[in-house]
Image: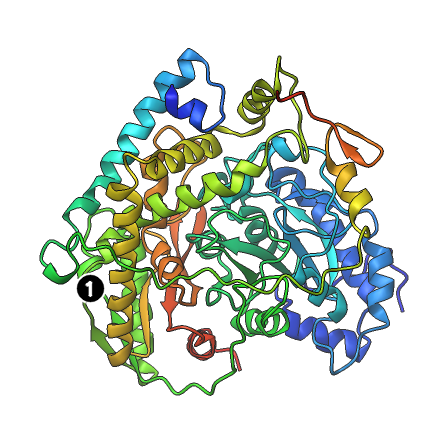
Amino acid sequence: MKKDSIKTIDLKNLTIKSAHSALIGGDYTVRELCEAYLSEIKKKDGDIHAYLEVYDDVLKQADEAQKKVSSKNMLAGIPMAIKDNILIEGRRAGSASKILEGYIAPYDATVIKKLKKAGVVFIGRTNMDEFAMGSSTENSAYGVTKNPHDMGRVAGGSSGGSAAAVGGGLVLAGLGSDTGGSVRQPASYCGIVGLKPTYGSISRHGLMAMGSSLDVIGPLTKTVTDAEILFNCMKGKDRYDSTSIDVDIKDSSSKILGVPRHFLKGDGIDSAVMKSFERSIEKFKSLGYQIRDIELPNIEYSLAVYYILMPAEASTNLSRFDGVKYGLHREGKNLLEDYLLTRAFGFGREARRRIMLGTYVLSSGYYDAYYNKATAVRELLKSDFARAFQTVDAILTPTAPAVAFKIGEKMADPVSMYLEDIFTVTANLVGVPAISIPAGSKDIGSKQLPIGFQIIASHGREDILFALGKQFLNES
Amino acid sequence: MKLASLSRLKLSEEEIVRFQGEMGSILAYVDKLKTATSDNNDTKNEPVSPSNKNVMREDVNPHESGIYTDKLIKAAPRHDNRYIKVKKIL
């Protein structure tokens, strides 16, 4: 055998499933696989900036993981990248915020515990919008992550680092968190698969909270099969997260897919995205599915509901960052001034905007008009979906209204950035699972920018998403 | 201004002007909610009990006392042995 320092592995077409076969077949070792990724990171991540930190003990982890490689253990030796808001004991975690400078995680998140047990190798922690607030990773305190398909454009967000790492071939799979689309939208922009599971199906113990009634952890992968493997490893009730639930694996036999045509008429949707979406619908028809037009009467209010409830919950969750318990501390004249200065300096603009927005909608004079009203409309949305799922097995929409936008394009106008989430937030408000599937691209100049579409199923029916997604991508 | 202090954030004059503009446009957007449910009389202006509920558990079976203490104290920017240091409040 040739004694190359870095083994040549076809990383571009590698999946968890194929890497697993190669590892048990002895084609290469976990160490060689990880070395191949580290070398790619060295070559490309200076430009992409997907990682905030690449761990210095990857090869040591790899040697440990090698011992777990077996035909029963699909994830042993699989290199993964973890979003900077998920805790790994003894390592830095900071939600890409200055306010957590120097913070070391005191324990493992439950998902990390499960992945460690399975033998996953953690390559590094990835960039994100500060505290998962944003749709472009431009709100990171540590610089923007670029789209591997076009360095002038964003990777999406907030899990942009994990998405760019997977899409750019800098890791095999990643973890993100999804509060309003933060796994699905960057997956769509980077040409990969992003799963937002059913609310509660994966424990959030050790995930930094943003909107607690919305947050879920989800995998970013190249195939639906890989997403399913990770979901099955991470799911299940956890005593450390009271909102977690067990999801039974069901056998799916879906026939009818719904499309909310009335919601896809706005001129804010890129025609290339709509064309790709229509082609996806045609493909499902040719696969034997029946497509039905459905009404979701309150869906046009989703984004407004979301931008009330999410800041309300975020402002509450972020009140714990005060310069006393962790991270940054700025010295003032008295304790109150310590708080004011620490938070003013530590939080970026979007975080401060949402803290104030949340404080506003929860203040006694406006609580009824905003928070209560939004809560009521959220219930209407839930009944809209419950009604829809009586007649269809899954719902299809685009994932995002357009392809990845240029860096800086939406930073001056928060509402234009928020509109990025128009198709994704509803699944979080309702609590149902949704997946973004890559479906072609739009040519701009010499670049091909990926387009994704979204499949939404009812609570606990990830099996439907996996079955449809695999069929669509011709995965066996 | 009052909102910034309720939010425990110190803002410069320039930031206040900027944030006021941005918050105004966001609130203008979410105001579309006012038109929601208008043709749905049964839910109009009625308090709805949310289906999202708090999940409580018994306060039992704690982890072994003290196993995280040092790590958590060390995370505080200002600490002294087993104490977190803060300024005088009264």
- Between A375 and A460, the one lying in front of the other is A375
Rendering coords of residue A346 (x, y %): 58, 27
**Residue A201 appears anywhere in the view:** yes
Describe the element under mark 1 as helix, strand or loop.
helix
Where does label 1 land, which residue? A261
Residue A280: quadrant of the picture: bottom left
Rendering coords of residue A154 (x, y %): 48, 41
Residue at screen point 62% across, 22% down: B89
Residue at screen point 67% across, 48% down: A125
Rendering coords of residue B5 (x, y %): 44, 22
Horizontal side of residue B81 vs A386, given as left or right:
right
Name the colour scheme: rainbow
Residue A142: quadrant of the picture: top right
Question: Circle 1: is it few (<14), some (14-19), or many (20+) Cα within 10 Å?
Answer: some
Residue at screen point 35% across, 17% down: B17
Rendering coords of residue A235 (x, y %): 58, 71
**Residue A119 appears anywhere in the view:** no
Horizontal side of residue A386 vs A181, given as left or right:
left
Q: Is residue A402 above or below residue A467?
A: above
Horizontal side of residue B32 vs A339, given as left or right:
left
Amino acid of disc 1: Arg
